[in-house]
């Protein structure tokens, strides 16, 4: 468990959070909780990475991660393959400083506006799939 807080909201903002872990297809997904602060919706890029970790020398990666975003136990959004919205995801990744995903990779990514509140990002594999995975949460600039 790792927790990160901005103690002085006037002086600092956390714009990216990521964690890597082992995803076990028998019921152990990678889970990241995050909060959207303030009174206005925020644009976010949320990614579930598996295959593209191999670009950094990580072996045994989850080959086809799925990403689901929940708020108060309700499914808000989901993605299986980031290429379903390649232009939007690639533009958001470049604007946030995120590394590029492989053109044909089966990594998952979602760009969406989230209302203030608490959220959970869940990265898992289909069926019994297991492997190393990464969950990333980026806050995007209002104009990106």
Image: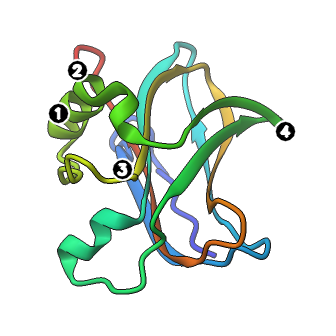
Residue 48: x, y in percent? Answer: 47, 54
Residue 96: x, y in percent? Answer: 22, 39
Residue 109: x, y in percent? Answer: 42, 41
Q: Which of marks 3 and 4 is nearer the N terminus?
A: 3
Who's the residue at 65% across and 59% down the image? Answer: 126
Cα gap from disc 4 to disc 1, whole angstroms:
30 Å
Mark 1: secondary structure: helix
Q: Toward which corner of the image does residue 51 lie, by quadrant?
A: bottom left
| Residue position for label 3 | 16
| Residue position for label 2 | 144
Who's the residue at 19% across and 28% down the image? Answer: 91
Q: Are marks 1 and 2 in contact (CB under 8 Å)?
A: yes
Q: Which of marks 3 and 2 is nearer the N terminus?
A: 3
Who's the residue at 17% across and 46% down the image? Answer: 97
58 is higher (above) or lower (below) than 31: below
| Residue position for label 4 | 73
Q: Earlier in the sequence, mark 1 or mark 3?
A: 3
């Amino acid at each position: 468990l790792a927790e990160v807080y901005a103690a002085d909201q006037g002086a600092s903002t956390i714009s990216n959070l990521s964690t890597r872990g082992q995803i076990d297809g028998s019921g152990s997904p990678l889970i990241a909780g995050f909060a959207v602060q303030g009174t206005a919706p925020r644009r976010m890029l949320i990614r579930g990475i598996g295959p593209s970790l191999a670009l950094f020398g990580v072996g045994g990666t989850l080959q086809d991660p799925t990403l689901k975003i929940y708020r108060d136990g309700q499914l808000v959004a989901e993605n299986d393959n980031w290429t379903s919205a390649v232009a939007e995801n690639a533009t958001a990744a470049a604007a946030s400083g995120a590394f590029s995903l492989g053109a044909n990779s089966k990594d998952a990514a979602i760009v969406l506006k989230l209302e203030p509140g608490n959220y959970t990002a869940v990265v898992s594999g289909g069926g019994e799939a297991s492997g190393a995975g990464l969950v990333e949460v980026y806050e995007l600039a209002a104009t990106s």
